[in-house]
Image (cartoon, grey):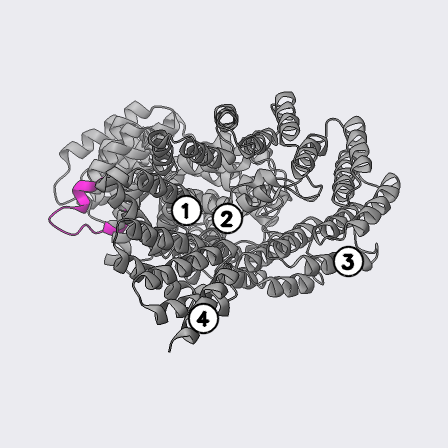
Amino acid sequence: MKLPVRLLLFCALGRALVAAETPSPLVSPSAASASQPSGRLVEEERARSALQSGFPATAATDFRELLGDETLPPEIRSRLQLELVSALLDQGDVRGAESALQAYEGPHTASYQLRAGLIAAYNRHWPQVKSALGASRLDDLSPGEKGWWYFLQAQLADSENDVDRRNRNYDEANKAAVSQLQRTRFQLGQELARLRVETPTEAQLATYRSNMERLQGTQPGYFALRFYAAALSALGRKPEALGVLQRQLAVMPAAERESADQIRLLIGMIAGESSADGRKALREILLKGLRPDTQRIALYLLARGTATPADRDQLRRDLDELIHGPTLHPIIEDLLLVHAQLALTDKQYNQAEEDAQRLLERFPGSSLKPAALGVRLAVAWELNRYRAAAGLGAQLRELLPPGRERAELGVLLAESFFRSGDYEDAADAYAAALHETPRTVPAGILIFQRVLSAIRAGKLDEAAHELDEATKNPELDPVNRWQSEWNLVREMQVQGRAQAALDRVEGLLRQGTQGVSPELRIRLQWLRAKLSFDNGAEEAATRQVDELLATLPAAKIDAALRGEVASTALLLKAQALLALGRDADGATLLDRLRAEYPKEKAAVYSYIVQAARETQRGDLARAQKTLTDMADNNRRSEFAPLALYEAAFNAESRGQDDHLREAYRLLDRLVKDYPNDDLVFYAQLKQGDLLRKLNDFGSARQFYENLINNYGQHPDVLLAQIALADTLFAQGTNSVVNFESAAAIYERLRDLPAAPVDLRVEAGFKWGYALAKRNQADKAATVYWSVAHDFLLDPALAAKLGAKGRWWISRTLLELGQLLEDGNRLDEAQRAYQLIIDNKLGGTAQATLKLARFRQLETRKP
């Protein structure tokens, strides 16, 4: 036995009425869509971009948040752990980097060894550096890591005083840099390496000081000064080192700008980029520096030192001054990118978008283009602008060489299309991604999304073909295979192709047990019985349920699934028995279900089934009590709101004003007790209808207006709009304003392309009817004819008419015919009635009688 007709009709209008679905063992709440990796991909790209742009603290936070996901596949977790190590190293948090590397759970690959070597080099543990380099191969590293491999070789050579080898490797590191951003990080690394000298003795320190004083005022003297300051820093005498540097800086000639910049840079590194002295020195380089590469290092350090919102505000003001200065700054591209990253960090999305777009427009060939696109992509994703994200992802993907990041962007491109509702393009993009599958995104998920995209695009045959082909792919796991099959079969049911759905399930079962898990086979057996019931084959459904229950005890499935399957199977058989008129057997089975599986959803839902049968027999009071008792005893059940909703319909159907008020109270309880349920919108809509039946049009109007104001984005908000127009029209007898407001709503809804065709036809009829009641017959006839012409005679729109729309078309033509008759336009009236007959609309008998009367009149003419 199925749900009451009135509820099915309501389901056709209310797309959000998911609570009306019978409990089934087919899907979990997430089974309709796979775990999409796109959000993680965007966040990971954002973290990497922050790291490259000089915000390692932000990057470390982002990587830690990503690692907090316990469902991450091992390979992804390992990669993110190594990315976190890089961020901590860049932040100068060597202990944190060591701790993160110790927590690393993956294989000791070349990427792992590289980071272990960089930590060892920072601590000047050169044997460990040699060991790490020996355990890694350059060819096993990603393009972004190869430069660091050369950088590490250069540091090892420097420790061995091999100047030529050091310089060669630093040159190779710069050549291997994948961007100007990375090249800047290498240059900074060289400068920082000079600070990490071996701790000198007092005698060595005296020699360094002597050299500095002897060569004072010369280029070698400035180099000796920096070496002496570095030695003091290595001894822990940072204040003394800073004092030496600042005194020298105060007396340097104006012509020695480059040497002054190097001294300021050393002050920034010794004092630290988070200190007042350090930031002052670095800011001077940024504002007045001579060499762009030194300015980039200063900018990178200033960005790295922005630990607080106040620091970021200060840097933002400095950057604003330089970006909008009278002359073009030598590193304007870098300034714009860091400004964009600052805005992105503080979630100032409009500013971040503006900065990145400005960089791309003014410098289309910039090496920072990928980073700028990455900022725009992150903004688009954060603001749910998925169409824009798709375009940006495609642009960014074109700039990357083949590899993991490019492959992952292919997935992100597909999911951007999917989330924007562009399912055809999504299906094509998922197909392309499958040819370049990134190792970190399982092929099974991509196949699932490919099939789901085709389903949502309405291409069920294509989806079935793709799924059949995908079953030959060994990477299609059982979970994604089953979820895909379920989505396909369910959509076949929704589109009225229940027999095709049943045939597909039968075919899957005929394949035998080979390759099919016991769990999958049990679910398929249940679905076969459900489809048989939906197709009206109740006898077959009862037999198939019995077969399922017979095989269930021996099935190797977990206890939870066993209880879910058994309970839903009993419910399904009870429904079939009730539909066959075997009420006593059905009632006995419902009692058994509640006794054996009292905690299962099916046991709770069984009361809704029982009430539906009582309603069908005309016992409305009993059905209402069954439903209200169920809601009272199962207040936390997901079906309690549906029970209250259905009980209200039973109360309304009893007809008396007291019953209408009772229905109103039941719906009010639903709204108050379950404010977040999908039925709340429809409950309030029905409350407005009940108030109209009680002639309380003022209160009804308030209900509809509140729905329109509070649920503006609801898919069925147009139902509230047309109900409001009906209310205004009912109040329009003595109010021209109300009448004109109602007519305006009807007219707008009739002409609204996004509205369902059936609703547009209804609105068109009501507009014409309102005009006719206000003695505007000619205008009403014009409106009626426009409805028939636009929605019945246009093949494209006529194909979209449902039963309700065809009913309103019939009413439109009948009213049009009568108006034409009253105006003595008899030929035109006959054509209106003939359209009803020709198109086999409701009201054919009435139209036939009208035409017969015309013919009788014709024969009586002399």
Pair 3/4: label in front: 4
Quarter holding the N terminus is top right
Nearer to the camera, 425 or 812: 812
The reply to whether dot 1 and dot 2 touch (C-beta < 8 Å) is yes
According to the picture, the residue beneath numbered tag 2 turns out to be 38
Q: Residues within 10 Å of mark 2 (few under 14, many from 20)?
A: some
Q: Residue at x 48, y 68 (%)?
A: 852
CA separation in Å, label 2 and label 4: 72 Å
Question: Given the image, on which type of amino acid does mark 1 rest?
Answer: Trp
SS under mark 1 = helix
Name above or below for residue 544 compared with residue 403: above
Q: CA distance from mark 1 to mark 2?
A: 9 Å
Q: Which residue is mark 4?
A: 856
Q: Pointer 3: what residue?
A: 506
Q: Is residue 617 above or below residue 411?
A: above
SS class, disc 2: helix
Residue to which mark 1 is pinned: 381
Q: Residues within 10 Å of mark 3 (few under 14, many from 20)?
A: some
